[in-house]
Image (cartoon, helix red, strand yellow):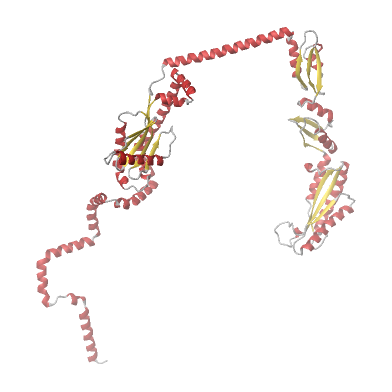
Amino acid sequence: MSDDARHNTNDKRQHRHTKHSPDAENRPEPEDRELARLRSLLFQKELNMLHHLATQTKNRSTETEHLSRIIAEALILRANKDDNLDLALSPLVGKLVRSSLRTNRREFTDALFPLMGPTIRKSISESFRGMLGNFSKSMEMSFSWKGLRWRLEGLRSGKSFSEVVLLHTLVYRVEEVFLIHSHTGINLMQLADENIDVPDAGMISAMLTAIQDFVQDCLASGKEGNLESMQHGERTVMVEKHPLAYLACIVRGVPPADFREQMRSCLEYILVEYGDKLEQFNGDAAPFAACAPQLEKLLRAHFVDEDRPIPIWTKILFFLCLSALIGGLAHYKWKDYQTEKLLKEENARLLGISKNLWEAADRLRQEPGFVIFHVEPSDKDPWQIFGLKDKHARSPEAVLRESSHNPEAFGFRMLPFISYDPLMVRARIDETILPPETAQMRLHDGVLHLSGTATMEWIMNARHRAMLIPGVRDVDIKKISDPRMSAILAMIREVENTVVEFPSGRDTPIPQDLPKLNTAVDTLVNMEKLAGQMGLLVSMTIYGHADATGSPQVNYEISQARTKTIAAMLYSKGSSMPISIYGLGADYPESSAPKADQSHRRVEMRVRLSRAGDAPLDFLQ
């Protein structure tokens, strides 16, 4: 490129830079300088204020300080205008309170205790005072002439004692209080006395509203008028109405003159506290549950002489009556006792009954094996005693002679019977069962316990014969044994714990298990001989197993062949015991090991003992 061209290019770049520079755009043209000076002279104050305002807006600390000076007044102004501030702050305040309760529970407890503590103590004190007052009232009504007169009145009229007391002592009682919305007739709150049944509050509020409308439309003749009270039997409905809500109280009796003023005060308080909610009522009565403390003040009752203590003369009269009653009962019992005593003595004298003879009859009643149900005395002949006697009991003559009584003064007419007295049952056992010297017998609660050692034949015979004895309901032979039976049981455990394994596809045992099999077979032969000496029969069951490597049919056949091998070896040794064989194939493996595991190819032996023609002796094994 030539020098002239490069120079022209630089001039163009410099001109372009000058043209697009911001300073060049903001720099006033020569003809605007006078206008800018005139603007400064005319609006300098306003420009300074705008600059100051822009500086404060950009400065966060200055803005925060200014906002802190006006936020309180702004919140008060907004709260007085509408409820939007409450709606906006309620979730935040609730969240803050819950968070503070979780982290600073002790501080909340300390803050609320001065308010809640006296309230709780006052509630407990009022409950105890009411309980003691009711107890005192019940005592006064029960132990007085007035109470007795009222009980008689209740029996005569068919009313309960509590109803009669209520009729005579009640001055007035406010039984129910209703707070009802005037425009809709909806029941906002209802409280009732705990001693009455509460009817349907919605039905009552609807009826009251209908009656109010009837009075307004028909009886007021276009003028303002409200139903203030309504009488029904012993109850009066008192109404205090306002355009937003009205109170209705159901009163039994005659309330005091200031009760309506109390209703008016209660309604005014509710209107002050809940006026906005009553004006904006949408059918939800839940916000008015807080009115309960005010309405409870109207649930009052007053009785005649309710604070009067029990008179001292009433207490004295009660104790005198009670003493007279106890004395009369004691005198009656004493006279009855004397009369009975005289009658006994007179009967004894007329019948010639001797005290010694009656004692003899009583002694016979106490003897085991006797039941005496009649004694017939006589002046000349011997007394006749009728009863029952067990054949193992002693003779009545021996019993009376042992107790120093004369048996010749009696004639005995005894019928045989079976006594279940333990002494008689034991006598029958001793007569029926003759135990060897090595065996002992003990009877307890109808169970015959055998212990020691004896032959199996004696044990089984004793058990069988004892179960036929009246008074024996069971025989315990757990502690008696035959030494030979212990040896047989040991042999059975040895045989059943022997497991013989086989090679795959073979019905002959593996070489390692042949000695065990021979030992088991010899043990079975010896056990069969020993059991035969004791009159017992031995039977055996052999179960054959196979692994799952072959088909089910092949596995069944090889397991069956293995059981036959064991049975053949046993019979070859001279055994004649019955043997049952079962080939189970691969259906019952030893464990979850692989299909070809050696432990799956085995036989198991189970031995049973029995008497000839009897079931197996499982209770001995």
Work out whether residue 519 can be spotted: no
Q: Nearer the viewer, residue 279 or 33?
A: 279
Q: Is residue 166 left or right of residue 243?
A: right
Q: Nearer the viewer, residue 303 or 577?
A: 303
Question: Is 438 located above or below residue 24 in the figure?
Answer: above
Q: Nearer the viewer, residue 9 or 237?
A: 237
Q: Is residue 557 left or right of residue 90?
A: right
Question: Is 579 located above or below residue 143 in the figure?
Answer: below
How far across and how far down the image is residue 30, in percent? 11, 77
Quadrant of the rendered image containing residue 221? top left
Quadrant of the rendered image containing residue 560? bottom right
Question: Is 394 located above or below residue 554 in the figure?
Answer: above
* Quadrant (top left/top right/bottom left/bottom right) for the C terminus: top right
* Quadrant (top left/top right/bottom left/bottom right) for the N terminus: bottom left
Question: Is 68 located above or below residue 373 in the figure?
Answer: below
Quadrant of the rendered image containing residue 490? top right
How far across and how far down the image is residue 75, in percent? 26, 51
How far across and how far down the image is residue 21, in percent? 21, 78
How far across and how far down the image is residue 276, in percent? 30, 46
